[in-house]
Image (cartoon, helix red, strand yellow):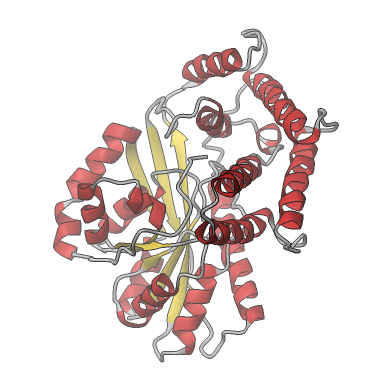
Amino acid sequence: MNREPFGIPPQWWAPRLTPWCVKLSRRYRHRQLRRHQRVIDIEVRGLHHLESAINQDHGVLITPNHSAHYDSAALYAAADQIGQPLYFMTAWQVFAMSNRFERWLMQRLGCFSIDREATDRQAFKQGVRILQEERHPLVVFPEGDIYHVSDRVTPFREGAAAIALSASRRHPRQVVVVPCAIKFWYVDDVTGELEVLMAQLEQRLYLRTSAGMPLTDRVYRLAGAALALKEIDFLGRTGQGTVKERIATLTEHILSQLEQKYHIDQRDAAPPERVKRLRQRIIGAMEETTDDEQILQLGNDMEDIFFVVQLFSYPGNYLRDQPTLERLAETLDKLEEDILHVDYPSVRGRRRAVVSFGDPAPVETGAGERGDMTRLTEILQQRVQTLLDELNCESVGREVAS
């Protein structure tokens, strides 16, 4: 997982969508994908679903999965095929960590910032206005974070559904949600490069390099060793059970301790929602204190929350269930970020991508109750997962030795 600054955003970055800039930047964006991510081909499926919704003058919300840092670039490359500019709701940290030119270009490509850890009314209103008034679709990644798990969607947050329902309730225009699945495959066999990375990770944790052991087994051995270090750190002992069970136990321990400390009771919620609530409470406490010792402790608590998000990104059984080259590479991408502390995982070979759009889901006019938001979120999550399942059934990925 990438480290990001958390706190009060320094400002709000508004969209400055400029269609001629979108068109002019097309070659540059495609060249960046080829050069920096080695994505040599993007196949687009179901584009007629998106095009039809736009031509019917609907307010269009696109909800893709978010498994890689370059999902937005691939999605925009798909929209380029029909000359369609897009709006993107983007974490404010992306703007804050970019240079002046990157921020300028992002805004002209339709990006605007949102504070995901707070109730960002300005970003919410902007999203609602786009769906009510703009011809160009709005893109929201409901998973929020990037988990490097392209075969499964992680629980969708309810913000996307809330924007769609609010836009539909307050305006006569029909609002539809277009589910979208984005998936990447390696064209080249990158097993050799993955073995090199595996040896670097083992060396970092002082493990012997076992070249004769299958890569999948080496990954689980490494995961067990890394997890044992953190269990000793937080629990004072190593855990028992499978990697998946140990991750769940450690996650619950850390979250429960912090929720007790900050007087929050939300044990029935999913980890991402629990993390969001804790971050909100800690950021608020940071704004209210000038005591250096307290600020240091709050910072340590924020680090513990970040570790929980790292744990959540590892499903535990993801690689064992289906040890494809892509799943192996995704898992090692995360380990490279988390153990070797790189900003972005290495690019190991040429890749191809598929961007698949599904049938638009109409948002019922007049809806807007809490139950409607939950139901719509569940529908969207299932539709995106179904699109991914259809792609996975093609068995494009290659099995690795297990």
Query: Which residue appears at 61% of the width and 61% of the height?
Result: 281
Q: Is residue 190 above or below residue 252?
A: above
Quarter-wise, where is residue 58 in the image? bottom left
Residue 53 picture location, percent across and down = 37, 74
**Foreground of the two, 194 or 125:** 125
How many marks overall? 0
Query: Which residue appears at 74% of the width and 26% of the height?
Result: 228
Quarter-wise, where is residue 234 in the image? top right
Does residue 350 appear in this view? yes
Query: Which residue reaches farthest front?
Result: 291
Residue 202 picture location, percent across and down = 60, 15
Q: Is residue 277 left or right of residue 160?
A: right
Q: Is residue 379 above or below residue 101?
A: below
**Foreground of the two, 327 or 199:** 199
Q: Is residue 332 left or right of residue 22?
A: right
Q: Is residue 103 left or right of residue 315?
A: left
Does residue 393 appear in this view? no
Q: Is residue 60 left or right of residue 79?
A: right
Q: Quadrant of the C terminus?
A: top right
